[in-house]
Image (cartoon, rainbow, N blue to C red):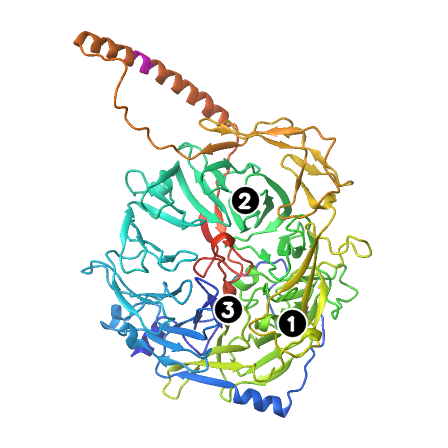
Amino acid sequence: MIWRLVVFWGICYFFVAPGVSRSVSESTVTFHRSQARARFRRDGSGTAGPAHGPPFAPCRLPLSSSEHEVLDDNTHETGFNGDDGSHVILTWVGDGTGVILVLSTINAPIDSFTGGGSSRLYRSTDYGKSFHDISHQINHTFIREEFGVSVGPGSSVILTADIPVVDHPGGIIFTSTDAGATFAFIQLPFHLAQPITYHFLNHDYLVALSIDGGLWLSLDFGAQWTKVHDGVHSFAWGAGINLFFSCSKVDTVDAEERGDLQLKRTQDLGKTFTTIHEDVFSFGYIGTFLFFSVMEDSRSPRVMYCSSDQGETFSQALLPSASTEQFYSILDGDEDMIFMHVDNPGDTYFGTMYTSDDRGIVYSKSLDRHLFDGRRKSDFTNITSLRGAYLTNRLDEDGRIRSVISFNRGLTWRPLNKPENVDCGEKVKKCNLHIHGEHSRDDQIVPMLALSEPSAIGLIIAHGSVGDSLSSSQRPDVFVSSDGGYTWRGTLKGPHHYSILDSGGLIVAVEGVHNQQVKTIKYSTDEGQCWKYYNFTEQAFFFAGLASEPGTKALSVSVWGFRPEEDGQPMWVAVTIDFESLITKECKHQDYELWLAHATQGEGTDRAGCVLGLKETYRRLKKQSLCRNGRAYVVSKKQSACICTREDFICDYGYYRHVNTSECLREPNFANKTLELCLNGEEDELLTVGYRKVPSDKCEGGFTPQNVVETVIHPCSVRTSPRPPDKPTSSVSHFDTPKEKLVLILVCVGAASIVLIAIASAVFIVRRMVYKIRTPEYRFSNLQVQDEDIFLRTGSESRTSSNGNAGPHGSDMDLIE
């Protein structure tokens, strides 16, 4: 029986650790049943226990009988009878279509045990209120769970069949352009090594990697495929139709480990290619920056290069030296700058955070002792509801983890203020709020990471502990900030799953209880100040996840889980609660207020609210307004430039900010330093007066750095490899007689010998010079900040958001390692 197979895979519903992850894009959620397990916890504070932190009184309002009746009439429960798959993948298709696809699978192919099997595919067209079994649309084919449901631009969908490689010339995919209403069967001429990758904007453009290293392109949404290159190891879309890939020069055996790859680019969809660099170890693309590491010598460490012009030119990233035991990790990036973590030597679990200039080349120190644990996890989070705000944790010298926040893109960091309704007590010397991040979720201390949305201005929901440091010995509670992290308020006791709806006009939460069934959802219409409780089902079930439409525009949410049936088999259950009939009033002009972001910065002066060179005044919903923003709601704001001050500048590479002043002073060992010896490229002079404007800072006039001697830095800027010159059609000199040919040969041999000796000597000298510099091993990671809310920006806005990454669920996705 199917259930016996589920038991075989260790999935027991009597001992459940609720799990939900978002993968591939923000629109995809994977629910799974998993067995609870204890994990090692490291925070310097002891073992987790049931104790709470400092007391606060959550505000609970009664649910009226009329409200209860309205919610009952708009709550829809669906039981997926006979479906006991261990994984359920829920995918929203399109924007505002109301279409949800649900794929039910088991973690391994059923036919490996029973000789047959199939996946179940369900479809909803009413935002999850009802589902229909459409498994016949894919011929009940078993779908690869690890490939999931791939959703592209518009209403395009791709499913990949799980078939044996032997005796099959290629794989099978099912494609849909109408949000899953119909599917087309396509036989591929190759077997997929990983999920098919869409172009950012055009769903017709697909790129795939075969198991034998072939790079394949389709320009008609998978109907026809063309192999464009062999020996490919990895690829990535760039801006426009730029496609980058690394490939083997001769063979594929250990080429990546040897750093023996070529980095190439095609700008015309595979018709022609340009070699960007030889001897490449690996590469990555984030924001508008192309990164790649190079094995310049088999006995030397790797060197990292960066390009901000799609590989036309590139320069070595100017970062402090590090040993080969260390790693570099990209925390976040966009078209303006990169956040880079540089690991400290040894198993210290911390390092230094740096921020780049707008070319991704010159880096300045941002934060010391930045936490990065042994599982290569960082708590770094981009607060998307307020421009310039970032949150992370650091491991202080006393071994304790403490949270810090930056409101100016890493220029300065500060502790989080104590929540206004929480007191620590007299024994606690420093009372601050500390936010649980990826480190805590890995240890199953919290079920979710900090949540923010661009359309919900200033709103942050996060699990935290109040005290001297982050502690797992007390049960974390839920805290809310309405001003981007300046002030906080305790709102719910204990861990919860939460979601933002209606552009911040509605927040919903379900208690995150282990090994217990749930039946209650909590909701707030005033940004978490007070909550109402509603029992959404009569028969409780084991919670698996909370799913809402991407973009926070909707007013409905689905609670997913499973309950044991009388025959001993579990049944997946989805309950969709539609709040639109409860919150019927459309918001009017008087329901909104003008809010000055960062108002406490420069408070009482004409620079109040000036951060990153701008004052921003938003029009946002009042907390006491009980109305709905609706799908047409668009964030509106007014911007005005501020006068430049030293706060708008960071100390440039080779300079440091003096402790007692705000001046940037030159580091003695960087005076007139030439950082790299360019062997085959062009030197790129960077003139610096010690100050560099913070990337994306828009200030005007005011402070201008001066009276500092300019320093010339020479990073190695190299152009892409030129194409081989065409063979000449004629020659000025002719060597026809045997004697002339002999003389020519002797002259050429002699000249070649001299050249070889000169090259060997030069290489020996250069190696001795290069080896004097300790060059680090570079490892790039696209940080997975929040599995529950993964979002991949596209086109010119391509970047990694605070709430996610563009890769499979799990630990950080290495781009370059």
Pick whichever of labels 1 and 2 is earlier in the sequence.
Answer: 1
Mark 1 or 3, closer to the camera: 3
At label 1, counting other C-alpha atoms closer than 10 Å, the crowd grade (few under 14, some 14-19, many 20 or more) is few
Q: Give how far across and how far down residue 788 sits, in percent.
A: 51, 66
Picture residue at 41% right of the left edge, 76% below the top: 12
At label 2, counting other C-alpha atoms closer than 10 Å, the crowd grade (few under 14, some 14-19, many 20 or more) is few
- Regarding mark 2 in the picture, which secondary structure is present there? loop
Q: Which residue is mark 3?
A: 550
Report the magenta residues as a range: 749-753
Q: Give how far across and how far down residue 556 sits, in percent.
A: 53, 78
Q: Could you say which quadrant of the image residue 363 lies in?
A: top right
The foreground one among 224 and 680 is 224
Q: Main secondary structure of the magenta part?
A: helix
Tell whether label 2 touches label 1 (CB within 8 Å).
no
Tag 1: residue type? Ala
Tag 3: residue type? Pro
Tell me the distance, in whole angstroms, between the alpha carbons under discs 1 and 2.
34 Å
Tag 2: residue type? Gly
Lateral position of residue 433 relative to residue 660, left or right: left
Marking on residue 421: none
Classify 798 as above or below 586: above
Classify 756 as above or below 485: above
Q: Which residue is mark 2?
A: 346
Residue 751 magenta-highlighted = yes
The foreground one among 497 and 173 is 173
Q: Which residue is mark 1?
A: 51
- Regarding mark 3 in the picture, which secondary structure is present there? loop
Residue 503 magenta-highlighted = no
